[in-house]
Amino acid sequence: MRFKIHPEGRVIVSVATLIVAVVVFFLLRMDIAPWNWIAVAAILLVYSIIIRFFRNPERELNRDPDTIYSPADGTVVVIEQ
């Protein structure tokens, strides 16, 4: 399974990657204090949430004519006229 980023999020992910790299680099070059490691862990957690938000997973679709697909990974709850 390939890992893809949605085109709308590529700029945001690129900027976030640059910011995370610079901040983590400087935090780790400073004194090795416990709060540095906590800050690095928090930054990487936020970064992983950003990556997960903009991911674009591959979908496996059944080519069944009786199947109704919902947009954005949702669930069709009701169909009304």
Image: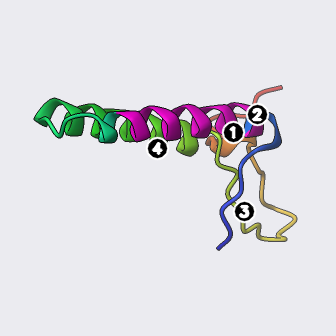
Taking depth in this image into account, of 46 and 16 the one nearest to the observer is 16
Asked where in the image residue 43 lies, by quadrant, the reply is top left
Specify start and end residues of the magenta stretch as a single range.
10-26
Q: Which residue is mark 1?
A: 14
> How far is the residue under mark 4 from the one under mark 1?
13 Å
Which one is closest to the eye, mark 1 or mark 3? 1
Q: Which mark is residue 59?
A: 3
Residue type at mark 1: give it. Ser
Q: Position of residue 29 (x, y in %)?
A: 32, 40
Tell me the crowding category of disc 3: few under 14, some 14 to 19, or many 20 or more residues within 10 angstroms, Cα based.
few
Which one is closest to the eye, mark 3 or mark 4? 4
Q: Which mark is residue 11?
A: 2
Is disc 4 in contact with disc 2, using a CB cutoff of under 8 Å? Answer: no
Taking depth in this image into account, of 25 and 8 the one nearest to the observer is 25
> How far is the residue under mark 3 from the one under mark 4?
21 Å
> How far is the residue under mark 4 from the one under mark 2?
16 Å
Q: Secondary structure at mark 2?
A: helix
Pick whichever of labels 3 and 2 is earlier in the sequence.
2
Is disc 3 in contact with disc 2, using a CB cutoff of under 8 Å? Answer: no
